[in-house]
Structure formats: structure tokens, C-alpha cells
Amino acid sequence: MQTILNMFFSIISLVIALIPLWFFMLIKYLLAPQGFWQNLVIYGLGFWFLAAFQVVFLIFWIIVLIGIWGK
């Protein structure tokens, strides 16, 4: 039973850690960029701004996984 709970909390923590990626995909879908310059701005913001949050969240995710599975 503990393994199932650990897996559940691991998946929930991964869902939380991937929020910047989903935010980027939602913005890209809603704005539907057309052409080079619009894509450049969307990808520029996505890679520079949201990717920084993504890296931080994934580091926190690894720390949370160590806490969950290290017991």
C-alpha cells in the first residue's frame, strides 16, 4: 500500500512540476502564432522565461521524490 501511495504522490508532484510547460503550451495554442516573428517571440519567452521556472521546478521535484521514496 505504501508503494501505491508513493507512486500517487510522485505523479502528483510531477504534474505540479510541469505547470510551466503546460502554461507555455496553452499560451501557444491560444495565441496561434503565424509567421517567423510571432513564433520567435513566443519561443523566446518560452525558452528564456518559462524554461528557467521549469528547471527550478524539476530540481524541486527531484528533491520531493527523494523525500517520498527515501523513507
Image (tube, rainbow, N blue to C red):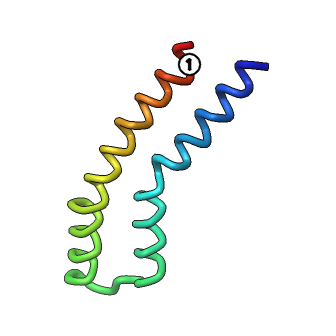
**Relative to residue 32, is residue 59 depicted above or below?**
above
Q: Which residue is mark 1?
A: 69
Q: Quadrant of residue 56?
A: top left
Which kind of residue does numbered mark 1 sit on?
Trp
Instruction: Please identify the residue farthest to the top as the structure is shown.
Output: 71
> Relative to residue 62, is residue 13 drawn left or right?
right
How many residues crowd mark 1 within 10 Å: few (<14), some (14–19), many (20+)?
A: few
Residue at the location (44% across, 36% down)?
A: 61
Dividing the image into 4 quarters, which one contains the C terminus?
top right
x and y, in percent, of residue 47 in the image: 25, 60
Q: How many marks?
A: 1
x and y, in percent, of residue 60 in the image: 39, 37
> Relative to residue 40, is residue 26 drawn left or right?
right
**Relative to residue 29, is residue 58 depicted above or below?**
above
Dividing the image into 4 quarters, which one contains the N terminus?
top right
x and y, in percent, of residue 7 in the image: 66, 29
**Relative to residue 45, is residue 32 depicted above or below?**
below
x and y, in percent, of residue 26 in the image: 48, 72
Residue at the location (44% across, 66% down)?
A: 23
Q: Quadrant of residue 8?
A: top right
Q: Nearer the viewer, residue 43 or 1?
A: 1
**Relative to residue 43, is residue 13 depicted above or below?**
above
